[in-house]
Image: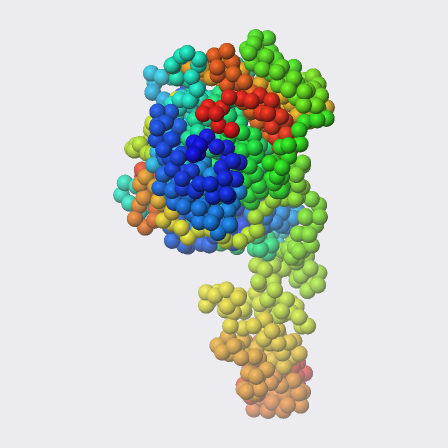
């Protein structure tokens, strides 16, 4: 499943590293007490610190530290008990201090790993280079005024985790799988809400290409701020093709920052931010080194939830699910929790079918999330039980499911109200079978002369005679015996 | 009645308590003195309405027996401290008109203690200088003149307005800030006491930053006791400043009479380079003798990296300044010069808003942090700085305090040609090492040179040991009987 | 170390300070003077010395991390935030020359 770009001179592979900026779930900013909520009026969530006023000093939000450590632990990464906040110096209108407080050579979290679940059910490990804490910039609004750019500092100082992967990704699909998995882990941990539309997760992609078989790293371009998983994949695909074209035409790729234009599906150079990158990092003298001990880490470790990989392994082991099915269920924590609610004390594979096919189908059709599901896990679990103990045929179960979806009633009530019990009493089915055989001698003759596909018609007749309540399996067996 | 402006803070405090005069009378006396001494250019703005209002409030509290530690005491505030609703400029054009909607922690503490703000004191632009000649709002003149001469002298810097106003009895005390000597050197030039406490004693919150790892606020007063009274109010832990120390504040005034008997005073040989001004050297020897006479022992010590302190400082301070001053960009406050693009607006605003020395230091600081030079300059300097701090740590295993001259010379002429920045930087040669090490230091006026100009002695102690520093300062002050202007004591 | 005009132009651009071409030469000379004086530091042996990371020696005071609680204590003061703005815009924004991205 390797991803190859066919060029005129040969085959090329793409080398991708992703930098994800994930907004830390917190009430207040990284260095001030202003709120972080999304969508407030311009400059209403701004402290004098966030506005870079003279004499203002940053004070670190302890919860953001905890969230970063928590995320590091979730990524099975090295936690650095001593890290340093550094200033990244550059001028921009929405960066009030003239520098961003970030971490440079000593980040709070070091190397870690993410396991990707590929669509074909295989998995593969991708290295995490580092995770560091930093503050967000404000927002430049360009469409408010004809000759001015308007600056809103509400986001200024919002805590971010920058999570940097190693250049281990080899295809747009892998990049997509990486983002999906990272998002899943962050949401499980409760450290980021993963909402890309509101900008709580933003992605920069570093892309380069090289001839297949080569191990060199060619010049990379950084595609900035792509705000959906689909766009990340499209941008990478486009950028990789562009690189191949440049190299094959005898040119050289320039190391630069590029912007992805989703409307035109192209990347283009951001010349405005291009010139003279020299961030002059140095340790922020307004802040102390960030230090904590093993006990602090252990305390956070103890509160970690079961993460997707562990849950997936458990689902495979305890419920006998396939790797693929388990992967689909655990991707969203709420889905996994729902599934376990359904599977409790009943056939897990049947539960998985009903959750993954019927329920997800229903939710998709209605465009609602699982938290808004009209059918509770408990009720769906009961329905699965009724199928497993042969009270309902799967056809009847589907009808019950529709009724549950319509009014949220529990399956027992529906079954009782409608008298929908499957007939599993042999003598009752016997009578119906005898009657059908007696009434249709011509069909019996046809069947006996070799037209065995008539069996379906016989079963249908019996079902009709029992108003659909007969167990179809039992009908088949009895018919076979009596016709044969 | 005696001239109220010549009183010490301690005396005024006691007499206000005894209702010998009112806070308003005390304030009016100072406002009148300020009016008469406009020529010194010590204040960038005066705030007589605020002063009268606060003096009246102080009188009410004095009446009701709820007086604070500085109730009714008129003070000047260096214009580096943000003061709510009152223009704060750091003596820079770029901040002209800026009225902070907040009050610095230190000035708030002084206000809460009942003191009366007279106005905002002039300084070198962004506290970058040793002469007060770089202020956008004009040079400050020292109230001192050489014997038989009429030419104006510098008050030192950067807290030159503070030093001049206290020396000339326009304010009973003033706040200063010291990054490389900006409290101690002007105190020495103007014949007053200046105290730079341990880095982390006073909150930096609300003080316009020059070099964050060095900046410290401190009091400038006419007596050691007054400095002890004022410092106690100014310092203390502030959760808004991550580098402020969570330590309780000692009663500095209470230790003043403890003397120096049994203390070991270190005399660093590196502070006596070849060619040290003879009068400065002689006063230093005199100081050693005074301390011995008071029962201290003196020992020779070595601070081997002293020579490297100034170049280290002129890397660390400009580097931090280049970053700290990036926020003056014409977007959110202060002056702006319009441009066609954002970058053009920045470049024009900052070219017009900053003065020559500030621009020079920003460029040096930008250079030493830039790619390829960081290790050779900034990182190297921070390592040398660690060695300088280690020198002091080792010295303080052998001695309790260190005595040195404060400045290599007395005040120089206001109109002397100053076209060599390095020569100007040498003014701070004795004050900078303590700044780099973060230890406390004070300058006490100890004598006059042959021209009748003040010379100061510097007392250094280990971190958080301001109490020993004050004890030594008090002994020096008692011995020196320094002739304060207007005979104030 | 002596700086050339191009270097001065580069750092002036980084620092966003307009330096007229006519002043580049003099500025380069002045900065070079300061830098060559500073360069004496290279003689100091700093092998195995950890750089000082700030002005405060925390070990002498407290090992307890000094972090803020995650509480909203600020914000909701748009007027004050904008009070000193040279070019405030309708709707509560700071205004700057149009930035084209
Ligand atoms: Mg990045
Ligand atoms: Zn980042």
Left or right of A16, for residue C86: left
Left or right of B456, for residue B54: left
Task: Please state which of residues B28 and C91 is positioned toward the viewer in this rendering.
Answer: B28
**Picture quadrant where residue A130 is located:** top right
- Residue ranking furthest to the left: A146
Q: Position of residue A36 (x, y in %)?
A: 48, 52
Task: Please state which of residues B274 and B451 is positioned toward the viewer in this rendering.
Answer: B451
Colour mapping used in the image: rainbow
Q: Position of residue B220 (x, y in %)?
A: 50, 30
- State the residue at coordinates (46%, 23%): B485
Task: Please state which of residues B280 and C46 is positioned toward the viewer in this rendering.
Answer: B280
- State the residue at coordinates (37%, 35%): B31
- Residue ranking furthest to the top: B275
Q: Is residue A30 visible in this depiction of the protein?
A: yes
- State the residue at coordinates (54%, 15%): B408
Task: Please state which of residues B339 and C64 is positioned toward the viewer in this rendering.
Answer: C64
Count of marks placed on residues: 0
In the rendered image, the quadrant that contains the N terminus of chain B is top left
Q: Is residue A245 visible in this depiction of the protein?
A: no
Is B464 rendered above or below residue B407?
below
Q: Position of residue A118 (x, y in %)?
A: 59, 51
- State the residue at coordinates (62%, 47%): A69
**Picture quadrant where residue A13 is located:** top right
Q: Position of residue A240 (x, y in %)?
A: 48, 38
**Picture quadrant where residue B171 is located:** top left
């Amino acid at each position: 499943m390797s991803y190859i770009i066919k060029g005129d001179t040969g085959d090329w592979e793409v080398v991708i590293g992703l930098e994800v900026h994930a907004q830390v779930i917190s009430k207040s900013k990284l260095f001030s007490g202003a709120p972080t909520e999304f969508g407030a009026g311009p400059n209403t969530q701004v402290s004098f610190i966030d506005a870079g006023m003279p004499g203002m000093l940053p004070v670190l939000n302890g919860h953001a530290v905890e969230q970063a450590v928590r995320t590091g632990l979730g990524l099975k990464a090295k936690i650095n008990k001593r890290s340093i906040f550094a200033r990244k110096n550059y001028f921009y209108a929405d960066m009030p201090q003239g520098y961003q407080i970030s971490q440079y050579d000593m980040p709070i979290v070091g190397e870690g790993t993410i396991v990707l679940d590929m669509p074909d059910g295989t998995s593969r490990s991708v290295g995490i280079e580092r995770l560091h804490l930093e503050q967000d910039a404000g927002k430049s609004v360009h469409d408010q005024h004809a000759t001015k750019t308007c600056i809103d500092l509400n986001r200024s100082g919002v805590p971010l985790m920058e999570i940097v992967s190693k250049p281990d990704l080899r295809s747009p699909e892998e990049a997509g799988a990486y983002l999906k998995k990272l998002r899943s882990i962050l949401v499980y941990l409760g450290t980021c809400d993963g909402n890309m539309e509101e900008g709580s997760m933003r992605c920069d992609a570093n892309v380069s290409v090289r001839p297949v078989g080569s191990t060199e790293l060619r010049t990379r371009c950084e595609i900035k701020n792509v705000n959906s998983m689909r766009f990340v994949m499209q941008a990478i695909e486009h950028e990789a093709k562009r690189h191949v074209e440049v190299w094959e035409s005898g040119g050289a790729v320039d190391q630069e920052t590029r912007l992805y234009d989703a409307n035109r599906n192209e990347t283009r150079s951001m010349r405005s931010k291009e010139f003279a990158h020299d961030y002059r990092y140095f340790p922020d003298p307004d802040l102390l080194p960030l230090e904590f001990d093993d006990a602090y880490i252990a305390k956070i470790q103890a509160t970690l939830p079961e993460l997707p990989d562990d849950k997936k392994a458990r689902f495979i082991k305890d419920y006998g699910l396939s790797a693929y099915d388990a992967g689909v269920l655990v991707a969203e924590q709420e889905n996994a929790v729902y599934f376990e609610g359904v599977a409790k004390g009943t056939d897990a594979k049947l539960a998985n079918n009903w959750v993954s096919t019927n329920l997800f189908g229903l939710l998709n059709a209605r465009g609602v999330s699982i938290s808004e599901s009209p059918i509770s896990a408990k009720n769906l679990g009961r329905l699965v039980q009724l199928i497993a103990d042969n009270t309902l045929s799967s056809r009847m179960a589907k009808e019950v499911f529709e009724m549950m979806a319509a009014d949220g009633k529990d399956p027992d009530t529906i079954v009782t109200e409608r008298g929908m019990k499957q007939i599993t009493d042999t003598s009752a089915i016997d009578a119906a079978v005898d009657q059908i055989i007696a009434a249709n001698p011509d069909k019996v003759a046809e069947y006996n002369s070799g037209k065995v596909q008539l069996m379906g018609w016989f079963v249908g007749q019996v079902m009709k005679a029992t108003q659909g309540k007969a167990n179809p399996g039992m009908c088949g067996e009895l018919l076979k015996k009596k016709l044969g | 009645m005696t001239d109220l402006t010549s009183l010490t803070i301690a005396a005024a405090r006691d007499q206000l308590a005894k209702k010998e005069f009112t806070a308003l009378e005390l304030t009016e006396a100072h406002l009148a003195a300020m009016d008469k001494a406009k020529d010194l250019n010590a204040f960038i703005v005066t705030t007589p309405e605020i002063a009268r209002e606060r003096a009246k409030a102080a009188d009410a509290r004095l009446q009701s027996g709820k007086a604070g530690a500085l109730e009714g005491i008129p003070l000047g505030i260096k214009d580096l401290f943000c003061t709510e609703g009152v223009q704060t400029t750091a003596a820079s054009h770029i901040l002209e008109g800026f009225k902070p909607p907040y009050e610095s922690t230190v000035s708030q503490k002084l206000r809460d203690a009942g003191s009366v703000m007279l106005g905002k004191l002039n300084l070198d632009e962004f506290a970058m200088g040793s002469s007060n000649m770089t202020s956008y709002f004009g040079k400050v003149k020292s109230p001192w003149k050489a014997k038989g001469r009429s030419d104006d002298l510098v008050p030192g810097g950067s807290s030159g307005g503070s030093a001049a106003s206290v020396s000339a009895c326009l304010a009973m005390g003033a706040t200063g800030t010291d990054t490389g000597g900006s409290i101690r050197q002007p105190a020495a030039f103007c014949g007053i006491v200046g105290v730079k406490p341990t880095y982390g004693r006073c909150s930096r919150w609300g003080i316009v930053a020059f070099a964050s790892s060095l900046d410290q606020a401190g009091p400038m007063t006419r007596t050691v006791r007054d400095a002890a009274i004022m410092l106690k109010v100014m310092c203390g832990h502030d959760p808004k400043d991550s580098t402020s120390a969570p330590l309780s504040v000692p009663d500095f005034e209470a230790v003043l009479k403890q003397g120096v008997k049994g203390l070991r005073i270190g005399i660093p040989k590196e502070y006596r380079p070849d060619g040290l001004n003879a009068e400065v050297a002689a006063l230093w020897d005199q100081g050693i003798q005074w301390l011995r006479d008071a029962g201290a022992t003196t020992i020779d010590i070595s601070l081997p990296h002293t020579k490297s302190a100034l170049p280290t400082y002129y890397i660390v301070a400009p580097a931090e300044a280049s970053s700290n001053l990036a926020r003056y960009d014409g977007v959110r406050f202060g002056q702006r010069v319009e441009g066609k693009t954002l970058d053009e607006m920045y470049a024009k605003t900052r070219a017009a808003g900053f003065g020559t020395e500030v621009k020079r230091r920003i460029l040096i600081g930008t250079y030493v942090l830039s790619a390829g030079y960081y290790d050779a300059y900034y990182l190297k300097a921070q390592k040398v700085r660690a060695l300088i701090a280690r020198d002091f740590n080792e010295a303080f295993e052998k001695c309790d305090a260190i005595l040195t001259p404060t400045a290599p010379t007395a005040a120089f002429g206001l109109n002397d040609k100053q076209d060599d920045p390095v020569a100007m930087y040498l003014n701070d040669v004795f004050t900078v090492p303590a700044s780099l090490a973060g230890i406390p230091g004070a300058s006490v006026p100890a004598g006059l040179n042959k021209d009748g100009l003040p010379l100061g002695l510097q007392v250094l102690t280990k971190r958080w040991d301001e109490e020993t520093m004050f004890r030594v300062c008090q002994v020096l002050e008692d011995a020196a009987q320094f002739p304060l202007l207007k005979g104030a004591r | 170390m002596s700086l050339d005009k191009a270097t001065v132009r580069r750092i002036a651009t980084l620092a966003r300070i307009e330096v007229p071409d006519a002043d580049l030469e003099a500025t380069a000379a002045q900065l070079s003077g300061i830098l060559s004086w500073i360069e004496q530091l290279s003689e100091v042996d700093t092998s195995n010395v950890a750089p000082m990371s700030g002005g405060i020696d925390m070990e002498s005071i407290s090992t307890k991390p000094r972090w803020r609680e995650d509480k909203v204590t600020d914000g909701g003061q748009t007027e004050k935030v904008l009070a000193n703005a040279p070019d405030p815009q309708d709707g509560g924004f700071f205004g700057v020359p149009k930035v084209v991205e």
